[in-house]
Image (cartoon, rainbow, N blue to C red):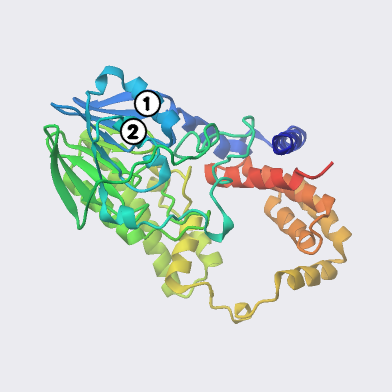
Amino acid sequence: MQRWTCWTSALAVTMFLASYLRAAAQDYGGREKLRAESSEFRREVIRVTDGVYVAVGYSASNVILIQGDTGSIIVDTATDPVAARAIRTAFGGLLREPVRAIIYTHSHPDHTGGARVFAGTDHPEILSHQRFVEAVPDIGRAGRDGGDQFGMALPESMYINAGVQLEVGRVTPPTREGYLPPTRTFKGDQLAQTVAGVRLQLLYTPGETADAISVWLPEKHVLMSGDDFLRSFPNISPIRGARLRTPEDWIASLEKMIALGPDEVVPSHTRPVLGGGAARAALTAYRDGIKSILDQTIQGMKQGERPDELVLHVKLPPALAENPYLQEFYGGVEWTVRGIYADRVGWFDGNATDLFPLAEKDHAAKLVALIGGPDRVLAHAREVLAAHDFKWAAELADYVLVNDSANRDAKRIKAQALIELGERQINAIARNYYLSSAMYLLRDLP
């Protein structure tokens, strides 16, 4: 029954798409950039330098192979055993047995779910920072598990990608069957180690997570940056119900990476950056982008600006806005601004009216009555929808739905507005969330 409901929901949304998406091609410029970005995830084992390879596109996250004299080292292990087995097969003879060590760059499950496949019967040492074992999962707060931002319920015809990965959990359901806990952790800023004859340094570089580490090969000048550097503006303020990722820590970690002078940077999502000039330029732009948004937001806050005012003018400078590593495929500038504000000064925006606001139901009822009743509100919503004012159309529908959650006309209007908004997004997280929400609205309608 559940699969039938999902299929009929998908069909309903697809029919809406066919019926209503008639805007000019330029309206979908963001979507087409996101679609083009899927080429980042084409399946390939890429040679980074002699003895270092990365498997891209086989899993939500990359898996990095370092060849040693007496075996191999694996950095991150894919999402699940299915993906890990595909990657191990793709490595083929490049993987020198036995696997001597597995390194977790951080605790997110898409990086740790295939460890058993790579460990096999070799009993490798499994390395992480001490904060890895202390990490509190940041998924599930506020009742949101992240599935909708990754488009897990969307039909194939509506799905593009997940911003910095092709997909998360859409083909193989999330599982922890392949996870192995660390056997050795370290505290502080770094751990120097020689494994299978390979000198490496594990550097504590908090950014996307508080337990994040980077792996540095000093003799090869190769940096493995985990999720602290990706081909997208970073997801500093996640919409799934997680805490703000501290921008100051992220900036400091990037500065530590830049100071190393890497010739190659291998992130755990998206493709590597090869060549010293390109690698350092990409890291520098990434740091400058985060710092610019942080500095502008703090300056505006000091001048008494509220979040809705800040997001109107806090933008990346033109040169950074055009940088391929700062496109908003995954994280968002506006979300970052709002997240920094809430983290620094809390929920209250300084407007006395908002100290004890009207309950949502009361606020909606008064507005609907002022406009002339639900029919007038929905009639106006149809007008603004036709005029491509999609955000206002969705909000008008909400005013009706908050006190009449079964109203079919309001559901259809809101669903149509969300589809139109979703199809215009460069940000995969926003797109997937908009379209998933539309599908749920249409699920129970005739």
Q: Is residue 386 above or below residue 355?
A: above
Q: Is residue 64 above or below residue 211?
A: above
Residue 387 visible at all: no
- Label 1 crowd bin: few (<14), some (14–19), many (20+), radius 10 Å: many
Q: Is residue 232 above or below residue 241?
A: above
Gap in Å between the C-alphas at discs 1 and 2? 8 Å
Residue at far front of view: 121
Rendered residue at 71%/46% (across/down): 440
Q: How many marks?
A: 2
Residue 129 visible at all: yes
Mark 1 in CB contact with mark 2 (< 8 angstroms):
yes
The x and y percentages for residue 384 are 76, 52
- For residue 377, which quarter of the picture? bottom right
Rendered residue at 76%/56% (across/down): 397
Q: Amino acid at mark 1?
A: Ile
Q: Say which quadrant the C terminus sits in.
A: top right
Name the side, left or right, on which 282 lies relative to 299.
left
Q: Nearer the viewer, residue 268 or 392?
A: 268
- Label 2 crowd bin: few (<14), some (14–19), many (20+), radius 10 Å: many
Q: Say which quadrant the N terminus sits in.
A: top right
The x and y percentages for residue 276 are 21, 35
Name the side, left or right, on which 324 lies relative to 119.
right
Number of the label disc, if any, that sits on residue 87: 1
Q: Amino acid at mark 2?
A: Val
Number of the label disc, if any, that sits on residue 63: 2
Q: Is residue 210 above or below residue 418?
A: below
Name the side, left or right, on which 383 lies relative to 297.
right
At mark 2, the secondary structure is strand
